[in-house]
Amino acid sequence: MSVYLLNKLFHRVFHDVAFRESVKADPAAAIADWAFTDAERKALLEGDIKRLYEWGVHPFLLAHCTRWQLFGMTAPLYAERIRRARDPD
C-alpha cells in the first residue's frame, strides 16, 4: 500500500483538469495505469472514504473529490463517511 501514491492521485485530480475530467468520465480507466493494490483500487472506485482516510489519505485532498463528485463522493456522503472514520463506534 502506498499512501504517497493515493495522495498523489488526489493532488493530481485537484490540479490537472484533463485528468480530473477523465476520472469523472471513467474512473476505472483513468486509474488503470496507476500502481495501486487491488484493495486501494477497490476503495477508490467505491468512494470508500473511511478506508482511504485510515490508510493516511489527507482529508483535505479527499474532500476535493466532492466538488466534482468523483468516485461517487458527494458532500453529504463525504461528511458521513469521514465522521465514521474519525469517530468509530
Image (spheres, rainbow, N blue to C red):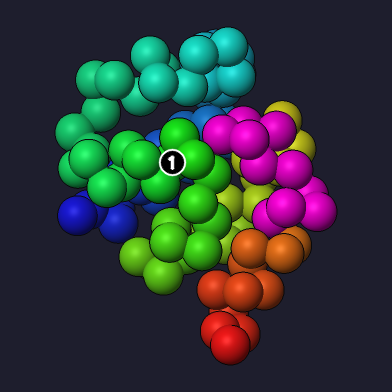
Q: Looking at numbered disc 1 in the image, what kind of residue is underneath it?
A: Leu
Residue 37: image location, x then y, percent: 19, 42
Q: Classify residue 81 as left or right of residue 48.
A: right
Residue drawn at the location 80% of the way across and 54% of the way down:
76
Q: Classify residue 6 as left or right of residue 61.
A: left
Looking at the image, is 8 positioned above or below residue 30?
A: below
Residue drawn at the location 75% of the way across and 37% of the way down:
67
Residue drawn at the location 49% of the way across and 40% of the way down:
46
Q: Which residues are magenta?
A: 69-78
Q: Secondary structure at mark 1?
A: helix
Q: Is residue 11 in sight in this rendering?
A: no
Looking at the image, is 72 positioned above or below residue 49?
A: above
What secondary structure prevails in the magenta region? helix
Q: Quadrant of the C terminus?
A: bottom right
Residue 35: image location, x then y, percent: 19, 33
Residue 30: image location, x then y, percent: 40, 17
Looking at the image, is 83 positioned above or below residue 64?
A: below
Q: Classify residue 32 as left or right of residue 15.
A: left
Nearest the eye: 10 or 24? 24
Label 1 neighbourhood size at 10 Å, few (<14), some (14-19), many (20+)? many
Residue 17: image location, x then y, percent: 60, 18
Nearest the eye: 83 or 14? 83
Q: Quadrant of residue 45?
A: top left
Instruction: Report if residue 61 lies within the magenta region.
Output: no
For this orientation, the residue located farthest to the front is 89
Q: How many marks?
A: 1
Q: Which residue is mark 1?
A: 44
Q: Is residue 27 in sight in this rendering?
A: yes
Looking at the image, is 33 positioned above or below residue 57?
A: above
Q: Quadrant of the N terminus?
A: bottom left
Residue drawn at the location 78% of the way across and 49% of the way down:
75
